[in-house]
Image (cartoon, rainbow, N blue to C red):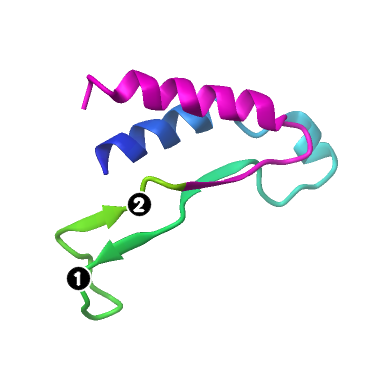
Amino acid sequence: MEASTRVQNKFYESFPACQQERDYKFITPSTMKPTQVKCAPGGLNQIPGRGLHSSTFQLNLSAFNGIGGARRDCAAQVKGLSGGV
């Protein structure tokens, strides 16, 4: 989970909301989310003690961010994590 959090944080640092998104009234900027999260079953109002994030991410890019730059950035982050987590 720490690895996916680091990749997400770097993504949001590299691709923050931009002025064009505000000008064109985009509701949300580009996002990066894990496609699968598993946790122990329980009540909907409980925070589980443990959870598992899948290593697959879904990129939702606004029209102002190119897919090439996002893919390169994410690939570099994952490569850099191999010895750091």
The amino acid on which the numbered mark 1 sits, given as a three-letter code, is Ala
The disc label shown at residue 40, or none: 1
Q: What residue occupies the far left of the structure in this picture?
A: 49
Answer with left or right where residue 76 lies relative to residue 26. left
Q: Which residue is at the front of the view, 30 or 75?
A: 75
Q: Which residues are magenta?
A: 57-85
**Is residue 15 in sight in this rendering?**
no
Q: In x, y percent, where is residue 28?
A: 66, 48
Residue appearing at x 76%, y 47% in the figure: 26
Assign a secondary structure to mark 1.
Answer: loop
Element type at mark 2: loop
Above or below for 73 versus 44: above
Q: Residue furthest right?
A: 24
Q: Quadrant of residue 22?
A: top right
Where residue 14 sits in the image (x, y, percent)?
55, 24
Residue type (three-letter) at the residue carrying disc 2? Ser
Query: Does residue 59 show up magenta in the picture?
Result: yes
